[in-house]
Image (cartoon, grey):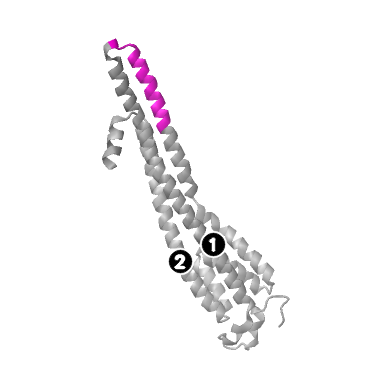
Amino acid sequence: MIDTAVRFFQEGGFFMFPIAVVLIVGLIVAIERYVYLSAQKLTNRRDFNRLHQMIAKRDLKGALNYTQESGSAMSTMIGFGLQRLARRQGREEIEYAMEEGLLDVMPRLEKRTQYLATLANIATLLGLLGTIIGLIAAFTAVAAADPAQKASLLSQSISVAMNTTAFGLMSAIPMLLIHSLLQTKTNEIVDSFEMAGIKVLNLLSDGSGSKTAAQPQGQNAAAPAQVATPAGSPA
């Protein structure tokens, strides 16, 4: 495959260079997005496990501080909900806040992924354009050639012109596959956010963990339970 691509590139015309540039840019975007999404998946899982433990122990102040210090997408989303909880707002307001937090972090997850589909289309179109221009030049050259050499010259010229289309497709197909892979990976992360939000909401609504909360010195044991109780719920 590599030898074929090199041969196509050597036998092609000017448009092979723009296609090669598009391919390089697409590979850079693909690698950057894959590394970023993989790191986010691990970081979000770690932060959710940590926050889940803190909320289960009713260490809500510590959990809120952790979300502000971490800066990960998962911490940002949960932090929006904990801020509403600190204001003694109800479950519905907390849910809306976490949905707002999810909308806030989604652009970071989807950033630049759509470029791959656009770059794949550009590579295909550049290949077709190079072929058309090559065919125009080939027919122009054949018109002034010796009749005995026209067939041979025309076939060679068409073969060279088709190389740009072949190279454009060879560049576009991998980028489309990678785009689909990254889109799937992004959707999995978004689904994990939604599941994490539901688990956190259910945990905040459950008052069974309030008894295990560690109390700061100088405060009574009832304070965290009051903070953890959403508005409108029984005290």
Residue depicted at x 28% and y 19%:
152
In the rendered image, the vertical position of residue 122 relative to residue 147, given as above or below: below
Question: Residue 146 placed where, x, y %?
Answer: 28, 10
Which quarter of the figure is the C terminus placed in? bottom right
114 horizontally vs 229: left or right: left
Disc 2 residue crowd, few under 14, some 14–19, many 20+, Cα 10 Å? some
State the residue position of label 1.
191
Using the numbered discs, state the Cα–Cα distance from disc 1 to disc 2 in whole angstroms.
15 Å
Q: Name the residue under label 2.
A: 43
Determine the secondary structure under disc 2: helix
- Answer with mark 1 or mark 2, whichever residue precedes in sequence: 2
Mark 2 is on which residue type? Thr
What's the amino acid at mark 1?
Answer: Asp
Q: Is mark 1 on a helix, strand or loop?
A: helix
Residue 165: x and y, percent?
38, 32
- Image location of residue 85, percent across then percent down: 64, 73
**Front: mark 1 or 2:** 1
Range of residues picked out in magenta: 127-147
In the rendered structure, does residue 107 fall within the stretch colored magenta? no
Using the rendered view, name the quadrant where residue 96 is placed: bottom right
State whether residue 120 appears in this view: yes
Is residue 16 shown left or right of residue 62?
left
Most foreground residue, 26 or 2? 2
Is 135 contained in the magenta span? yes
